[in-house]
Amino acid sequence: MNPQHEWTKDELLDQAKKEGIRLSKDTLDKYIGYGLFAGTSHSNGRGNGRAASTYFRGMDSLRLIKGWKNTYRYKYKSMVVLLYWRGLPVDYAVLYTQLQQYHESLKTTFRQAPDYLESGKSSLEDDIREQLLPEFSQSRSGPLDQERKQQYKAAVNRHVTSLLHLMHAVTLMLKHGRLTTEVIEAFARFHEPDPNQAVSLPPTSELLEMPYFHPDTWKERMEPRDDPEANEQHRQAMSEHLGELIAILQIYMQLLLDSPLAKTPLFQRGRTLVSELGITDSLGLLLPALYGLVGSGYSVKLVELLQRSESQEAWRDLLQASVKHWIVTNPVPTRLRGGELNESTDR
């Protein structure tokens, strides 16, 4: 496999052909238009114009796109969210447009929510499936056995139930114009729909006054500006923030993957479980997660916190402490040698 990370269009087309990925120049241009690649232009020298753009980790993106095409019938423009969470370069302006469109779809759905709360009858469940869980509204390619069909249906129903509870909570928040005890209890139902299992969250004055839960915060961050110049500046700032957010999260993820904790069987089992559940490929989870982080403004505080050197040191300390805890609680004696975790044969 070619180890290079920077690819020109021609190189991508050649390598895709070698790997059996059907890709034409027109299709590649469409991918770029959908924001699935972020190109870097290079100068030919002063007065000699611009050289062709290169695309960092372009083949990594193409391999993932191929896998998603074979598993789910995602719309290509939706894949920008999935690639973003994988830490792959995307067009952040296109990604922000996706978040704004999601914001508008939520507003449309929530406008119907008061009627739903009053009558308990509405077409909202269908709207949720089609608008907010896009991969579940698309037919899957390839046959599924009966067990997989049942698992798939159960997963869809869990998502729909949770989002109905979320709608209830957000509608109440919009009704009151702020976070209240009633709203907090409704959000608890979103996390745990079963009333017998839901945990009561005692609200504090500090929690109730947090700006992340105020509708004006979401409007300020997600809605277009009336003035074209101000709107362009806002979009540019939000696009830069999206790049900053994933960059700092990637630093912490890399620290985790480079740590001894990543070599433990427990961590490997966790990665296997995440893969089996399809979390990293679920647009129905990753799009709302990114929208919630960015729209609430919490992502700004998160970036600010994670950029501190003391935060990164604390993360390293936590990873090391987690390894020590695993060693103590693991029934098989283990020891740490040369920065790697090795199982001991001593009993």
Image (cartoon, rainbow, N blue to C red):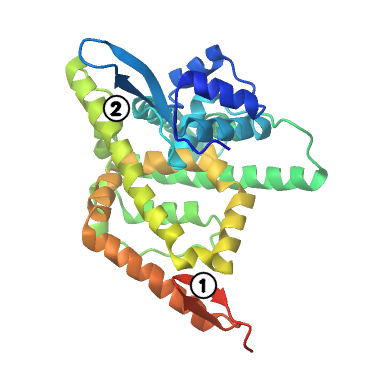
Q: What residue type is labelled 1?
A: Leu
Q: In the structure shown, which secondary structural element does the residue marked by tag 2 occupy?
A: loop
**Residue 42: where, in percent of width, then height?**
31, 21
Please name whichever residue, 182 or 32, is drawn nearer the observer in this view of the structure.
Answer: 32
- Which amino acid does the dot numbered 2 rest on? Glu
Q: Quadrant of the rendered structure where residue 130 is?
A: top right
Vertical position of residue 236 compared to residue 173: above or below: above
Nearer-the-camera pick, 151 or 282: 282
Q: Mark 1 points at which residue?
A: 341
Give the residue displayed 48% in from the left and 51% down from the top.
190
Q: Position of residue 98 (x, y in %)?
A: 41, 27
Instruction: Answer above or below: position of 346 versus 283.
Output: below
Q: Which residue was labeled with disc 2?
A: 223
Q: How crowded is mark 1: few (under 14 residues within 10 Å), some or many (20 or more)?
A: some
Q: Is residue 219 visible?
A: no
First in sequence: mark 2 or mark 1?
Answer: 2
Q: Which residue is drawn at 50% across and 39% down?
A: 3
